[in-house]
Amino acid sequence: MKILVHYPFTTQQVDELRAIAVGDGHELKFAEDEDAAAELVTDCECLLGFFSKKVTAAAPQLRWIQSFSAGMDNFLYPEIIDTEQVVVSNTAGLFAPQGGEHAWAMLLALARGLLPSISQMPERRWAGGQVIELTGMTLGLIGLGGFGRETAKRARGYDMRIVGLDPVRQAPMEDIDEIRTPEPGNLDWLLSCSDAVVVGCPRTPQTYHLIGAEQLAIMKETAYLICVSRGGIIDESALIQALHDGQIAGAGLDVCEQEPLPADHPLWDAPNLILTPHRAGASQHRPRKIHEFFCDNLRRYLQGDSPLNIVDKARGF
């Protein structure tokens, strides 16, 4: 069996993956760029890392793709979805702690009025914004995967009531007080009762623009909206209008529908908004975690076991 790694691992990390393959009598190749990957993948059964249309189109023997990403909205193009023999696994849950930290950092910055204080430091002004106590309030989580659950852990330390929506996880869960399915009526319920809402679900055809003008109007005027999963789940035009109109107290976006966000985009001028450049999944441990996960899943596959984190390609997660 031939295996292609197309990800910026160090030489040592590639050698460790190669040792796993060779130890089981297989061959591992490494590609530094897309052109090299498209050339090397032609006779490979496994592809670990990046998988563009150009690369997968050149791989008729491909049977397993291990993605470096947790979100799959940019990778599950029709050719992959419709090819039944190709199994795709992702890194869901691998970046959950830092995702929870990022969501919580955004929420705290908004609630504690840090934005005005930070913006006025260059002018040496002793000033700040409105300060809100989160302790005892209600947190709504849209999506109870890794990001959602890690955010809930942090909210529990603030004695918050935590409610959530998830299409799969319905059994009682630690740190979640009430879980419902993401139907329109239940979305309205969560938005109307929450003092803060954190979006941690994947972007799929079902979640695209899940939160628009109608949903923002349901939220409390004192509520905050945070998104750390994927751009496009929140209708940005509707959010901009809601912030200018004071329909909600503030928002934090780590992800946008177009990335990088153009310099002339109206989001930059929206009040009480924190923007970060898709960093919720980042940490000093991310490269190590990805390498360790790739090693573990490669061992499983070569031993005839199913890889962890197999994606339902039709559902998109």
Image: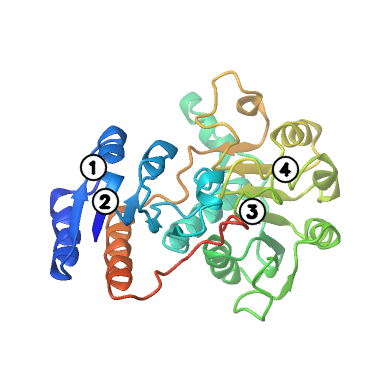
Q: Nearer the viewer, mark 2 or mark 3?
A: 2
Residue topped by disc 1? 31
Q: Earlier in the sequence, mark 1 or mark 2?
A: 2
Location of mark 2 (residue): 4
Q: Which is nearer the N-term, disc 1 or disc 4?
A: 1
- Residue 275: x, y in percent? 55, 37
Labels 1 and 2 touching (C-beta < 8 A) = yes
Asked whether the beta carbons under mark 2 and mark 3 sit within 8 Å of each other, the answer is no
Look at the numbered disc 3 and give the secondary structure of its residue. Answer: strand
Query: What mark, if any, has residue 123 been given in the picture?
Result: none
Dot 3 surroundings within 10 Å: few (below 14), some, or many (20 or more)? many
Q: Earlier in the sequence, mark 2 or mark 3?
A: 2
Q: Which structural element holds mark 4? A: loop
Disc assigned to residue 199 = 3
Point out the image quarter for the N terminus. Answer: bottom left
The image position of residue 23, as x and y in percent, is 14, 69
Q: CA distance from mark 1 to mark 4?
A: 37 Å
What residue is pinned by disc 4?
Answer: 209
Tell me how far mark 4 sits from mark 3, CA to CA.
12 Å
Could you say which quadrant of the image residue 88 lies in?
A: bottom left
Question: Is residue 7 visible in this depiction of the protein?
Answer: no
Label 2 sits on a secondary structure element that is strand
Whether residue 81 is visible to the viewer of this picture, yes or no, is yes
Percent from the top left, x then y, of residue 144? 61, 66
